[in-house]
Image: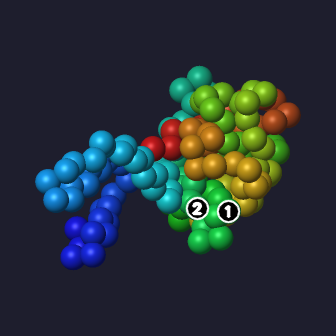
Amino acid sequence: MSSTGLATGLQPGRVNIRATVDGVESSAVRLTILGTSRSGTFTRNPNTSYNVSGTATLAQQPNGSLVLRLGSDFSSSNGPRLEVFLSTTSTVGTNSLNLGRLQRTSGAQSYNVPAGVTLTTYNWVIIHCVPFNVTFGYVQLR
């Protein structure tokens, strides 16, 4: 807390704030501060022989837009028409958002996320083979 009353958070979370002036205390105000990114590590789909590994990060840009980044450690088995999805579950379905074709099967890459999607709209990133409807792997964003 600064001498001017400015409180600075060090990490995302929840806080209850009360003010006291001349011995009179206000009611608590609860704030939730979200981070500017969510990330996780890919897990291969245990029901297939395909491999996916590495990290994924969904990050908010200074202009408010979102970008999905697959890390330099990203690697996936090859397959026909592999696409990148955001989803509310670990499976591709009507609740999923297709971000487009996987740019390459290894290394860092980025995907722009359409306007209107927030950092908390989707919890999963999925690498999915569209022609055969097979999920190669997924990551839960934290």
**In percent of the image, x 66 and y 28: which residue is there?**
91
Amino acid type, callout 1: Ser
Q: Is residue 44 above or below residue 1?
A: above
Q: Residue at x 71, y 42 (%)?
A: 85
- Label 2, on which residue? 60
| Mark 2: few/some/many CA within 10 Å (<14, 14-19, 20+) | some
Between 108 and 77, the residue placed more toward the observer is 108
Please tell me whether mark 1 sits on a helix, a strand or a loop.
loop
Quadrant in which residue 126 is drawn: top right
Q: Identify which residue is drawn at 28% across, 47% down.
A: 26
* Labelled disc at residue 65: 1
Q: Position of residue 102 (x, y in %)?
A: 74, 53
Residue 129 found in image quarter:
top right
Query: Please, which residue is most extreme toward the top here?
Result: 47
Tell which of 130 and 4 is nearer to you: 4
> Residue at the spot x=67%, y=55% of the render?
105
Q: Is residue 139 among what the camera can see?
A: no
| Three-letter amino acid code at the position of disc 2 | Gln
Q: Report whether residue 94 is seen.
A: yes
Determine the CA span between mark 1 and mark 2.
6 Å
Left or right relative to 129: residue 135: left
Quarter the C terminus occupies:
top left
Under circle 2, the secondary element is strand
Give coordinates of residue 111: x percent, y percent. 71, 59
Which mark, residue 15?
A: none
* Quarter occupied by residue 74: bottom right
Is the C-beta separation of discs 1 and 2 under 8 Å? Answer: yes
Asked which colour scheme the image uses, the reply is: rainbow
Coordinates of residue 121 in the picture (x, y in percent): 63, 41
Residue 41, compared with residue 20, is above or below; it is above
For the N terminus, give its image quadrant: bottom left
Q: Earlier in the sequence, mark 1 or mark 2?
A: 2
